[in-house]
Image (tube, rainbow, N blue to C red):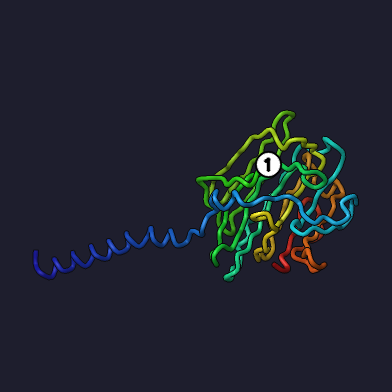
Amino acid sequence: MSPRSSAGFVLVTAAALTAALATPSSAASNTPAQLTQSIASHESHTLRGLAQPGKVNATVSSTNWSGYAATGSTGAYTSVTSSWTQPTVTCSSATTYSSFWVGLDGYSNSALEQTGTEADCIGGKATYGAWWEVLPASESAYSGVTVKGGDKFTATVTYTGSTFTMTLADSTEGWTKTTTHAGSSGFKNASAEVVAEAPEVGGSVASLANFGTVTFTGAKANGSNLDTFSPNEIVMTKSSSSAVRAQPGSISAGSFADVWKAS
């Protein structure tokens, strides 16, 4: 082999090697940080600071929930579902959290069976994840999954007469997770919710991550559009004032947008 052809061979090989080594590194850099169980174990989704809890078909406020809750008597709701696109959070150096979920119970009692996603800013870095929760236990992270901003999700919670089935599907990444559970002690199935939230972290309501806007579609309870049940609209406000943290828009045919306003 001539020196020229030998040099050409080395050049091509080096270029190919560089490309091969760069590919996994590039792929890894495009995957945001993912929720771990050590983080999830400090989070909970209990409703806090609800004003005027006895109102029906009304606008109420909470210090950590924003969205809609259909309410009724014991046993009124046996299923709830909705779809959304996972928001991409805007992060600064502050540590902030946001969650998006569907659930049964939790509005007028201490029970709650739910599943959803989250978009957090931890250490200045966007962190995404998927989880389920049955109160009074803390959140449990789904393992072995990847969640990214822009992923398409559908979440469903169904009571079958003996157990609750919580299913979360990411059609973008191509995975589905299902958990069955006996439910919270004393569950009543008296409400069905579709919510954007500032979760409770370490016993206190967290600062709300700037998720921009999340649009819930196909929100249904018992197989019918959530708005047919005249649900309560829940506006998230700061605990020390009436300043709005997150605001749901009007709900129509099972769809509504929820907008971040302040941390």
Please give the name of the residue rendered at 13% of the width and 70% of the height, measured from the top-left corner: 4
Q: Nearer the viewer, residue 221 or 181?
A: 181
Judge whether 261 appears above or below 98 on screen: below
Q: Quadrant of the C terminus?
A: bottom right
- In this rendering, position of residue 112 left or right of residue 227: left
Q: Residue furthest front?
A: 203
Query: Mark 1 sits on what residue?
Result: 134
* Residue 210 drawn at (x, y percent): 65, 66
Please give the name of the residue rendered at 58% of the width and 63% of the height, measured from the top-left corner: 121
Please give the name of the residue rendered at 51% of the width and 59% of the height, measured from the top-left corner: 32
Please give the name of the residue rendered at 59% of the width and 68% of the height, measured from the top-left corner: 91
Q: Residue furthest left?
A: 2
Q: Quadrant of residue 188?
A: top right
Q: Nearer the viewer, residue 189 or 218?
A: 189
Q: Nearer the viewer, residue 115 or 52?
A: 52
Judge whether 188 appears above or below 38 on screen: above
Q: Residues within 10 Å of mark 1 (few under 14, many from 20)?
A: many
Q: Quadrant of residue 175?
A: top right
Q: Amino acid at mark 1?
A: Val
Q: Quadrant of the N terminus?
A: bottom left
- In this rendering, position of residue 133 left or right of residue 8: right
Local secondary structure at mark 1: strand
* Residue 140 drawn at (x, y percent): 60, 45
* Residue 44 drawn at (x, y percent): 67, 50
Number of dots carrying numbers: 1
